[in-house]
Image (spheres, coloured by chain):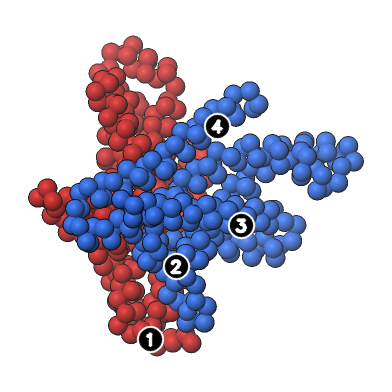
Chain colours: A blue, B red
Amino acid sequence: MPFLLKGVVVTIELTIMAAVLAFIMAFIAGFARLSKFAIVRGITQVYVEIFRGTSLLVQLFWVYFVLPFFGIELSAMMTGVLVLGLNYGAYASEVIRSSILAIPKGQTEAGIALNMSPSLIMKRIILPQALLIMLPPLGNYLIELIKSTALVLLITLHDLMFCGTMINNVTMRTTEIYSLVLIIYFLLAYPLTLAIRRLEKRLSAGRL
Amino acid sequence: MWDWEFTISILPLLLEGLKITLIATFLAFGFAVVIGFLLAIARRSSVKILSLPVKAFIEFVRSTPLLAQLFFIFYVFPKFGLVLTPLVAGVLGLGLHYSTYLSEVYRSGIDSIPRGQWEAAKALNFSKARTWISIIIPQAVPPIIPVMGNYLIGMFKDTPVLSAITLVELLQTAKIIGAQSFRYLEPITMVGVIFLILSYVSSLGVQWLELRLNQR
């Protein structure tokens, strides 16, 4: 079991690092999609479509097996963080974009009327409102991300899933081990699900 | 770097793998559509012994990774005498995983039917079955078709996970080619391109469907 717990630690580390990267990418891409410049919008759209259109596992394999041909060799952990972060960043950028667009135009106009600069309008008026809208869907993506980390087993990263498989190969107690792995994942993800549901309820209670 | 001749020579093999991917996708989708509907109805049931376990099952499946579930089905079921081929295990795992998502979609569709429709059916002395078949389902299903389409695309993109339980689908085919020829660049890139084209085209299809349904 200690071996399995080591895997849990790797899974959690991977989730956190990938989530941070995804969050940053989502914000950059979400804002870039709203840019005045067509070229910035175009490049971002290509990024989003490529990462959303090809399968996550294919991307992991591509970075892990193909990039070394170009002289870029990444460790399994780096690959996992990079690909998961970029992939979920692409999905989440749509959330950021749509929640900023969901703020009524009148809010921006009111900001202009009050002689606020565009960045001040964004910071003081748009973002505080948009953040409330985007939190629940972003939370759901975080849960998806935790579940997706299981895939890094296939690029030989020693996460929970990998450790489970290793123990299985040695002990052959398949039933107990895979049941335990399922339960651990459930314990990791389910509290988050509950937390997000509560958050959603509280946010929708008074404010909107 | 990039060898076009090699790319063309492996294309037939990849298309063979794509066939398996598509078969697995559609079988699993059909399975998920049926099971998802049953789960949705069972969860609405007023019989607590039925609705609570179903709810727990849905929550559990949604909170655990598809890969872990596939391993469970493929490696643990045989211990109880149920040996499945990779394709059957894959279809079962993928279908079951997405059936829990689809059950939520159904539920939102059913919940969006106004109460008055149920009451009207009751006033007309319709049986339960007739209420479902001629009143509820015809109204609940069309709005959720685009959402189901998106889940179909999601399933398509999740099929590479089935390579982990030794199903030789598109990605596994590419890996085998890579292992034999020591060239990973072309096969894996081509797999990405194939996925991109198919899922992009089908997402355009879903958008079109959504527009058409909204017009009505």
How far is disc 4 from disc 2 in space, using C-alphas?
34 Å
How far is disc 2 from disc 3 in space, using C-alphas?
20 Å
Residues beneath discs 2 and 3 located on the same chain? yes
Q: Is residue A163 left or right of residue A113?
A: left
Q: Disc 1 on helix, strand or loop? A: helix
Disc assigned to residue B28: none
Circle 2 is placed at which residue position?
A: A76
Query: In the rendered view, would you say B116 is above or below B7?
Result: above
Q: Which one is nearer the viewer's eye here, B97 or B190?
A: B97
Q: Spot the residue most to the front.
A: A2
Image point (64%, 65%), residue name? A43
| Quadrant in which the C terminus of chain A is drawn | top right
Disc assigned to residue B6: 1
Q: Is residue B43 left or right of residue B186?
A: left
> In the image, residue B123 lies at what x, y percent?
33, 11
Circle 4 is placed at which residue position?
A: A199
Q: Spot the residue most to the left.
A: B81
Residues beneath discs 4 and 3 located on the same chain? yes
In which chain is the residue bearing label 1? B
Circle 3 is placed at which residue position?
A: A25
Image point (67%, 60%), residue name? A41
For marks 1 and 2, give the one nearer the viewer.
2
Q: Which one is nearer the viewer's eye here, B203 or A121?
A: A121
For marks 4 and 2, give the one nearer the viewer.
2
Residues beneath discs 4 and 2 located on the same chain? yes
> In the image, residue A182 lies at what x, y percent?
31, 46
Q: Amino acid at mark 4?
A: Leu
Whether residue B197 is visible, yes or no, is no
Q: Amino acid at mark 3?
A: Met
How far is disc 4 from disc 3 in space, using C-alphas?
24 Å
